Each structure stands twice: as C-alpha cells, then as structure tokens.
Image (tube, rainbow, N blue to C red):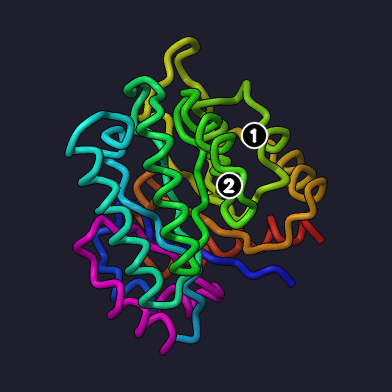
Amino acid sequence: MQKINISAIVGSKVPVEEQIPMIRDAGFDGFFAVHTGCEPLKAWAKLVREQQLDFESVHGPFHLVNRMWEPGMDGDDYLDLLKESVHACHQISVNRFILHVTVGNRAPDISEEGLKRFLALCDYAKEQEVHICFENIEPLPHLKAVMDFIPDPYHGFCWDIGHNLCYTPHIDMMERYGDRLMCLHIHDNHGVTQPGNIDYRDDIHLLPFDGVLDWEWFASQLKKYHYNGPVTLEVSDQGLPEYRAMSTREYLAAAYERGRRIREMLL
C-alpha cells in the first residue's frame, strides 16, 4: 500500500522538531522539509528515524534560483549552494532533492550557461546518489528547457498539483513529464482567481478537497502513469480560518484523513 507523507507544515509557528512526533502520531509514514542552508537537517533526520518515519526528500532553496540563468559569479555561487544542499541530502541518506528552476512570473532568459549549470548540478547529484526532481511552478518555459536538456532518467519530475491548478491549468504536466514522475506535492486551492493574471497569492496550500481541484481526475492521471510512490501532502495551516482554529495535532489528523482518501482513490 502506498505511503502517506507530509511536509513540515507550511507557515506553522510550531518548530519542526515538535511537528515530527505529531506527524508520526497522526499516522503519516514520512516527512520532507525545505533546506535553505541553515536548517539542522542532521538533527531532523535523527529525530525522523527515531520516530520510525521516512525522510522522503529535501526541498532545495529557491528564492534566488533565477541567478542560475545569469552570467557571472552570482550564478556560480548559487550552483555551489545547491551542491551543498545535495551533499547534505547524501549525508543523511535522503535520495530525492526537489528543485525549482525559476521563481516568480519573470526570470532571465533561458541561457546556455544556465542549462549547463543545471546539468552540472545533476551530474554532481548522481555522484552523490541523489535524484533531482524538477518541480513545476509558474508558467515559464525554463522547466521544459531543463527537462529536455537533461534527459537522464536518473533525474525526474515532481508534480506539484496545487501549482498546476493555480499557475498552469492549461498545461498537461503528465503528458509532458508523466514518464519521469518521481514524487508529488499535493495541495488544493481555488485555481486562477484573476483570469489573465497569475498571482503567487493563489498558491494557498489548502488541504485536499477544500478547493476546486478535480481529485477523481488527479487520481486517474496517477493511475494512467502507474505512479506507486508516496501520497505526499504539502499543506499550510494558515489557508482557512478553521485551520487556524485547530491545534497542530487536530490539523495533522485532518491532513492524514485527506491523504488516506486520495490513497483509496488510487487503489
């Protein structure tokens, strides 16, 4: 049976160290977290394994990832930062590293230098026995350029269905990348609320079934491409007033129930 995993709760004021035991108590099988370079991944990994959870993946830093496409030292320095994060994954035996290739609706033009940097990162990650999972984000052509430039099946795709819904509902991500699907980020929202205007504020990370996503369709896509990996939620307890009224334990229990419903749809 497929495992049900969750990220450290997006926007939560509860420290990750306190969330991890509660994640296990709620019934989850695994966990993932963001790494920007300063988080105590080794301590988290130790706690995760003490709780008999899987440390599924690490989400790489992304706030300045557009520098990867720019000439000069800033781009080289950012590549070094990403390599450090990949090495941190290797050190804690986590073999999936989630990566955005841009941030925001605008990014530098696709450049040969940028493509070569992503290739260098992938080559380094393979040496470290870490799979790079490129994640869909805003509607820019850079993801396709990177995926086309790096066809090595060792690396693949992270389908963020919430991003697909509120940023790129016109793009069939599974038709493009279903054969390279390695992991999921699952959350809900209200889609593009301002037609013609893609806005990061639409990306509200609701629990599944609290937005407008067609979950029967989502499950059918995963079945079509024979996905049998974890059902992994990436949700925020800040998206609705009723979430904010819950304790962390109550919220995690609700999140687990939504993940269980999705898993049942995949059986």
- Of callouts 1 and 2, the N-terminal one: 2
Going 63% across and 25% down the picture, which residue do you hit? 171
Residue at screen point 37% across, 20% down: 109
Is residue 43 in the magenta section?
A: yes
**Of residues 28 and 142, which is closer to you in this image?**
142
The kind of secondary structure element at disc 1 is helix
Mark 2 secondary-structure assignment: strand
| Residue in view at x 50 percent, y 22 percent | 192
Residue that mark 1 sits on: 173
Per the model, the C-alpha gap separating discs 1 and 2 is: 10 Å
Instruction: Identify the magenta region.
Output: 21-50
Q: Residue at x 32, y 22 (%)?
A: 108
Position in image of residue 240 (x %, y %): 40, 43
Please report contact status of discs 1 and 2: CB closer than 8 Å, yes or no: yes
Q: Which mark is residue 17?
A: none
Q: Which mark is residue 157?
A: 2
Q: Kindly identify the amino acid type of the residue bearing the numbered disc 2.
A: Phe
